[in-house]
Image: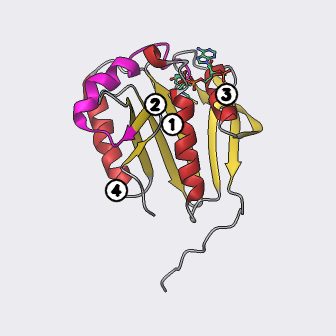
Amino acid sequence: MLVPESFELTNIRLRRPRLSDAPAIFEYGSDPEVARFADWPRLTSLEPLLETLRRREILWNEGLEYYWIITLKDSDRAIGAISCRIAENAAEIGYLLNRKYWGKGYATEAARAIVDWALSLAEISLVWATCDIENIASIRVLERIGMHREKILRNYRIRPQISGQARDAYLYVRISKTGTIKQKQHKI
Ligand SMILES: CC(C)(COP(=O)(O)OP(=O)(O)OC[C@H]1O[C@@H](n2cnc3c(N)ncnc32)[C@H](O)[C@@H]1OP(=O)(O)O)[C@@H](O)C(=O)NCCC(=O)NCCS
C-alpha cells in the first residue's frame, strides 16, 4: 500500500507529524471544547502527547494507523489532525481541529481527501467513522463528504469530558464503488 506522506489540498496541507508539533497539538488537545466529544481525557501535560507521537510513528510503520497533521498552506504550524486506521479491508477515520479554525471547511477538506484516497486503494472496500449523536459539526463533516448514516450505536463510548455514562453514537460509512477488493496472496 502506497501511503502519501503529505497531501496538498486547496486551503490546507496534510503532513506527517513531528515531535516538534507537540506544543501546537497541546494547544487544541487541552481545549475542553475541542475534547468535549472525545473518548480520551483532554491533555493536561506534554509528556503523554510526546509518547503518543512516538507510538504513531510505530503504528504508521506497521501499517496499522496513518496520522497526518493539518496545517494552513502558508504556515507549518499544526492546527489539527486526521487519522486513518486500517483493519483488514476497512479504514476508520477521525479528525479534530483547533477551535480558532472551526467553521472554515478545513475538516471537510481533510476528511474528503483521506476518504477518497482510502477508497482509491485496492485493499479498502469500506471507510467508516463514528461520532457522538450530539456532535453536530462532525455529523455535518461526515455527511458533506458523502458518508451514509448506517445506524446508531447505543451506549457506544464514554466521553469523559461530558460524563461517566456511555453515550450513543452514529456509525457512518462509505463503501467503494465496486465493493470488491484484491485478494491478498497468502504464502503457505
Ligand atoms: C468536528 C470538527 C473537526 C469540524 O471542523 P470544521 O473545520 O469546523 O468543520 P467544517 O468547517 O468543515 O464544517 C462542518 C459543518 O459543521 C458546522 N459547524 C462547525 N462548527 C460547529 C459547531 N460548533 N456547532 C454546530 N455546527 C458547527 C459548519 O457550519 C459546517 O456546516 P455546514 O455544512 O452546514 O456549513 C471540529 O468541530 C472539531 O475539531 N471538533 C472537536 C473534535 C471532534 O469532535 N472531532 C470529531 C470526532 S467524531
> Which residue bears the numbered disc 4?
61
Numbered circle sitting on residue 110: 1
Q: How many other residues sit within 10 Å of disc 3, few (<14), some (14-19) or many (≥20)?
A: some
Q: CA distance from mark 4 to mark 3?
A: 31 Å
* Labels 4 and 1 touching (C-beta < 8 A): no
Q: Amino acid at mark 4?
A: Asn
Q: Quarter of the picture for ligand 1?
A: top right
- Mark 2, other Cα within 10 Å: few <14 / some 14–19 / many ≥20: some
Q: Nearer the viewer, residue 133 or 99?
A: 99
Which of pointers 2 and 4 lies earlier in the amino acid sequence? 2
Front-most of residues 172 and 111: 111
User: Which quadrant does the N terminus fall into?
Assistant: bottom left
- Between the C-alphas of marks 1 and 3, the distance is 15 Å
Classed neighbour count for the residue bearing mark 1: other residues with Cα under 10 Å, few (<14), some (14–19), many (≥20):
many
Residue 119 against residue 135 in the figure, above or below: below
Q: Tell me the number on the disc at residue 139.
A: 3
Residue span colored magenta? 14-37
Which mark lies nearer to you, 2 or 4?
A: 2
Residue highlighted by disc 2:
11
Please count the marks in the image: 4
Mark 2 and mark 4: Cα distance apart in space: 28 Å
